[in-house]
Image (spheres, grey):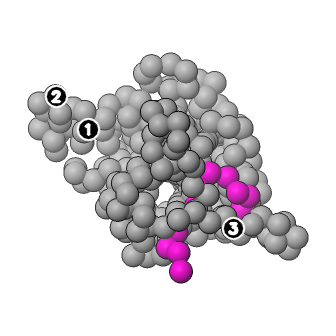
Amino acid sequence: MAESPVSASANQASGQHPYKRVLLKLSGEVLMGDTDYGIEPATIERLALELIDVHKSGVQLAVVIGGGNIFRGMTGSARGMDRASADYMGMMATIMNAIALQDAIERNGAYVRVISALHVREVAEPYIRRRAIRHLEKERIVIFAAGTGNPYFTTDTAASLRAMEIGADVVLKGTKVDGVYSADPKKDPEARRYETVSFTDALTKKLGVMDSTALSLCRDNDMPIIVFDVNTPGNLLRAVHGEPVGTLVRELG
């Protein structure tokens, strides 16, 4: 059942952001831009500038980044690799992406820290919850790398977990599509985009918002999710300001 998402008009009238602290989940594939593999420089530069715009607007910003543009654990496992080994390789791919994003942000004048669930002290800080929160309070962008640090868990689950740990107000899932659909719009011309969908419907109908572990964690802790097209310039800032961008996933009354 679809509803309209939270209206931005009241927030704009009051001059306040609806969210003080947000966690953005970025898939590694977003960093590829129009290429087939790796990191496309113009794309990561644009994303860095958009993150800085959000940060300058007064919102505390954390990012969880995937590694699918370099290596995906599930794919490696499907091709015969040991699942745990493949997942650890995927975690290391996220560290590479996090360092690249950190570099782009720093080159554009903002303060940023990479915090990794795997210990790679030469290039990233180890994950400590209180330290991460303190960085946010000191107005630094925080990039969480290496997922949860455990195999068999996706970066979607890591995003949900970190959002709870840092006390985020919302999880923003930046993707290549403009929201959650009732079916694959590329295959079904009758597919419709939801403005709002419940966690229960997202789980039972397998709408592809996040994996079931991540969705259940958000549902059980009343953490809303906004799924939106991060490739459209300005969408991230609009989502943070509460404008109706993408699909809002929450438990409906």
Element marked by disc 2: loop
Q: Point out the frontmost of discs 2 and 3.
A: 3
In magenta segment, residue 248: yes
Q: Nearer the viewer, residue 229 or 20?
A: 229
What whole-number distance in Å separates the C-alpha atoms at marks 1 and 3?
36 Å
Q: 150 above or below 3? A: above
Tell me the crowding category of disc 1: few under 14, some 14 to 19, or many 20 or more residues within 10 angstroms, Cα based. many
Q: Point out the frontmost of discs 1 and 2.
A: 2
Q: Point out the frontmost of discs 1 and 3.
A: 3
Residue sitting at 64 percent across and 31 percent down? Answer: 45
Q: Nearer the viewer, residue 61 or 190?
A: 190
Q: 76 above or below 175? A: above
Residue at image mark 1: 73
Image spot of residue 191 (x, y percent) = 52, 44
Residue at image mark 3: 6
What whole-number distance in Å separates the C-alpha atoms at marks 1 and 2?
10 Å
Using the rendered image of the protein, determine whether residue 129 is visible from the camera's viewpoint: no
Q: 244 above or below 49? A: below
| Residues shaded magenta | 242-253
**Mark 1 residue type:** Gly
Tell me the crowding category of disc 2: few under 14, some 14 to 19, or many 20 or more residues within 10 angstroms, Cα based. few
Look at the magenta stretch and give its main secondary structure. loop
Q: Earlier in the sequence, mark 2 or mark 3?
A: 3
In magenta segment, residue 11: no
User: Would you say 11 lies left or right of 89 here?
Assistant: right
Q: Nearer the viewer, residue 49 or 81?
A: 81
Residue 79's mark? 2
| Pointer 1 with pointer 2, Cβ within 8 A | no
Image spot of residue 200 (x, y percent) = 40, 68
Element marked by disc 3: loop
